Amino acid sequence: METESSSRKLMEAESAKTPRRHRRRCICLSVTAALLALGLLFLILGLTVFKPRRPTTKVDSVALDDLDFSVDLARLRVVLNVSLALGLTVHNPNRVGFKYRNGTALLRHRGNDIGEVPVPAGRIGSRDTRSLNLTLALMADRIISDSTLFSDVVSGTLPIQAYVKLSGKVRLVFSIHVATYTTCDVDVILRNQTLSNLKCHYRTKL
């Protein structure tokens, strides 16, 4: 009788443990499934809604803000003042803001930097567009070592280039570094103080 009673108690104990084990297994499976579903959701959002997109830059206007020059043929020297007004817009297509750091816009002549202007840091909101108006002025001390400047001024056509770089980050699940590059080549026709052959190129790097 005692043996039968012990066997019965053992069977009852095992029967009581079985639902608890089943419940724990169900909880573990539910938690695992929820984590997998969340991971899949974040993956889908990262590849679609929150996929990082390249900010785009567009030059809206390029104009001569100031031009004054004189040629000293006896000394083979040029006195030149040039200011270029550059208007551009930057569009952020992302669903989060694009924050860019302090930068510099450059004025170049045949690869030599002859002027610069600071571009202050800023932020472009989600799917927003910001306008930047920059004035690039030639720096007199930069043209002393530019041996080709004299011949270009004498010829009547001065090829110059405006270069603007914006570097920053787009913060999604993690930070994505972004850099936009804008380059505009243009000829300054000195005799009538006009611009010709304007060509702008754009590049964005993620």
Image: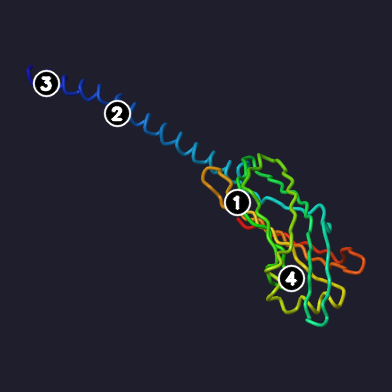
Tag 2: amino acid = Arg
Tag 1: amino acid = Asn
Q: Which residue is mark 3?
A: 6
N-terminal of the pair, mark 4 or mark 1, is 1
Tag 3: amino acid = Ser
Q: Which residue is mark 2?
A: 21
N-terminal of the pair, mark 1 or mark 3, is 3
Determine contact: label 2, label 3, CB under 8 Å.
Answer: no
N-terminal of the pair, mark 2 or mark 3, is 3
Residue 104: percent from left, percent from top: 64, 57
Q: Quadrant of residue 74?
A: bottom right
Label 2 SS:
helix
Q: Quadrant of residue 18?
A: top left
In front of the other: 130 or 178: 130
Q: Is residue 45 left or right of residue 193?
A: left
At 12% from the left and 17% from the top, the residue drawn is: 5
N-terminal of the pair, mark 2 or mark 4, is 2
In front of the other: 53 or 90: 90
At 71% from the left and 52% from the top, the residue drawn is: 56
Give the Cα separation between the discs numbered 4 and 1.
23 Å
Q: Which residue is mark 4?
A: 109
Q: Which residue is mark 1?
A: 102
Give the Cα separation between the discs numbered 2 and 3.
23 Å
Residue 107: percent from left, percent from top: 72, 63
How busy is the neighbourhood of tag 4: few (under 14 within 10 Å), some, or many (20 plus)?
A: some
Label 1 SS:
loop
Give the Cα separation between the discs numbered 1 and 3.
82 Å
Determine contact: label 1, label 3, CB under 8 Å.
Answer: no
Tag 4: amino acid = His
Residue 70: percent from left, percent from top: 84, 71
Determine contact: label 1, label 2, CB under 8 Å.
Answer: no
